[in-house]
Image (cartoon, rainbow, N blue to C red):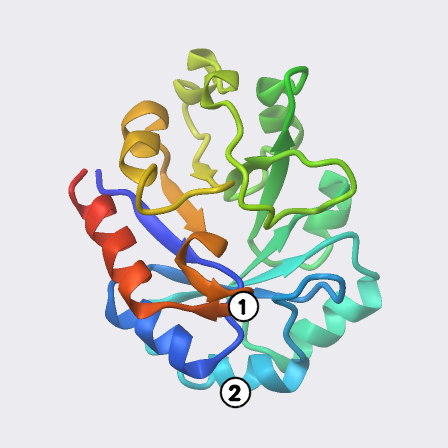
Amino acid sequence: MRTRVKICGITRVEDALTAVALGADAIGLVFYAPSPRNVSINQAIEIVNQIPAFVTVVGLFVNAETSYIQEIISKVKLNILQFHGDESPEECMQYDMPFIKAIRVQTDTNLVQCAEAFSSAKALLLDTYTEGVAGGTGHVFDWNLIPATFRQTQGIRVILAGGLNVDNVAQAIKQVQPYAVDVSGGVEIAKGIKDTTKIAAFMQQVYLK
């Protein structure tokens, strides 16, 4: 089964279209003000309006107020939500939309327990833990922290994130065998500004697997 790709932290229409043209299955829009990749509602609408059929638009939130998420959902055509904070399963489920739950992996993270708690999620996104930072650090975590028992559990779809780039994504796919990979900083020339050459090279490495 092929590995799917999400290009996250899209802030410009041209970057979204480039990602799609080069084979990305999904794009991610960050609705988190502290992030340098944060987009406004108007930016998001402009980007989404240019996305063709069969490409998934993911809205990323970090411990956001319910009212804010509801406002985004009402104005921006998102296909799935991604919760990247400390949201409970109940908080993730309240919007009656499919969702992804991000888990920032540490040495003591019980991924099997996380999967049980968020069994209603369409996937678990495994990212690097950095104290005080929600994500997008560009650092890789130790993939050996993903136990074989977790990977082999039926029904769990793993999206691997955290410091992926053209130099390590092939090895990541070989070792972890994720359902999808998620990249942001690894295909940028500046935070929030994607690079066509880097996206193309990244996609080529994914296709090799």
Identify which residue, 185 or 51, lies in the foreground.
185
The residue at the far left in this view is: 208
Please tell me which residue is depicted at 54% across the width and 76% down the height of the picture: 77
Question: Which image quadrant is residue 87 in?
Answer: top right
* Residue 46 numbered tag: 2
Q: Is residue 120 left or right of residue 15?
A: right
What is the three-letter code of the residue carrying label 2? Answer: Glu
Q: Is residue 155 above or below residue 29?
A: above
Taking the view exactly as shown, the residue that stands out farthest to the front is: 189
Relative to 12, say whether 37 is above or below: above
CA distance for labels 2 and 1: 16 Å
Amino acid type, label 1: Gly
Which is closer to the viewer, label 2 or label 1?
A: 1
User: What residue is at 35 percent from the left and 52 percent from the top?
Assistant: 5
**Helix, strand, or loop for circle 1?**
loop
Between 109 and 88, which is closer to the camera in this rendering? 109
User: Considering depth in this image, is 172 or 91 the residue closer to the camera?
Assistant: 172
- The disc at residue 192 is 1
Q: Position of residue 202 (x, y in %)?
A: 29, 52
User: What residue appears at the point 72 percent right and 40 percent down from the top-left corner?
Assistant: 89
Disc on the earlier residue, 2 or 1:
2
Q: Position of residue 18 (x, y in %)?
A: 32, 74
Asked if residue 88 shows in the view, the reply is yes
